[in-house]
Image (tube, grey):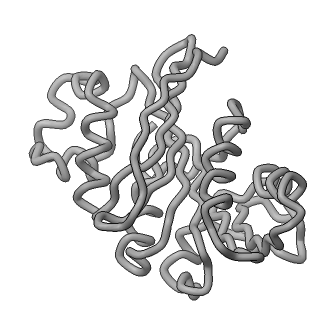
Amino acid sequence: MTGGGTNKTDNRNMEAKLEIRLDWLDGLDQDEVRILDAFGGEGEIWAEIDRRRPDVTIYRTGIEKKRGKGPESSTLYGDNMSFLPHVSLDVFDAIDLDSYGWPTSQLAVVAERVPEKHVFLTCGMWAAGDPSTAILESAGIPQKWGPLVPGIWSKFHVELWDAFLADLGYRSTVRVVAPQVKAGVMIYEHLFPVGSDGDGALVEDDPID
């Protein structure tokens, strides 16, 4: 999948997603946090975190395309790219981009508007598809080279993604790489702004059907 990566996640490997967010929460000296969940869905991830951490009050605002999906009292309905450039992102402690493809457009907006914020991210990298033009260009690959041989860049998904993150000013402090049995990998990670505190870790996970 290429482009803005606005498809919803299917929440496979939920425990990996939870652990990354719980580790961040455990390191905070706060009794409440505010989260913008830009690929909100039903809000399962932060609902489970709320259940596991009753000592911390979690105020979650979701963004969801499908009206009626997710808690209506705390969900903005529509395309997240209609909201991210305009809502007050600085009121949130972290931005959650739990997408299914390449959330390049969403991450670029967050990096430009609130570069100091922590970001949780899911990225699906499929063996049959090339990265988006934005990712190729961040690695110095001319746009005209992209379509020369379909799939030629897919074997370098992770390296190209890292170049894109660095170009935006991020580094991944925790990353779980979950190979998919059929093709490609899912990446779950916590992004810190460059220069912030925190140690990185790369974790290889088991394949997922």
Where is residue 157 drawn, in percent x and y?
32, 32
Return the residue nearer the eye: 195 or 82: 195
Where is residue 120 drawn, in percent x and y?
55, 55
The quadrant in which residue 194 appears is bottom left
Return the residue nearer the eye: 195 or 137: 195
Return the residue nearer the eye: 68 or 44: 44
Toward the top, the furthest residue is 181
Q: Quadrant of the C terminus?
A: top right
Q: Identify which residue is drawn at 50% across, 45% down.
A: 189
Q: Identify which residue is drawn at 74% across, 73% down.
A: 61
The quadrant in which residue 132 appears is top left
Where is residue 87 drawn, in percent x and y?
58, 85
Q: Would you say 151 lies left or right of 117 here?
A: left
Q: Identify which residue is drawn at 47% across, 39% down.
A: 175
Q: Identify which residue is drawn at 32% across, 43% down.
A: 161
Judge whether 198 appears above or below 31 on screen: above
Q: Would you say 186 lies left or right of 75 here?
A: left
Judge whether 133 appears above or below 95 on screen: above
Return the residue nearer the eye: 199 or 106: 199
Q: Would you say 75 lies left or right of 19 here?
A: right
Q: How many marks?
A: 0
Where is residue 162 drawn, in percent x and y?
29, 44
Q: Would you say 161 lies left or right of 79 here?
A: left
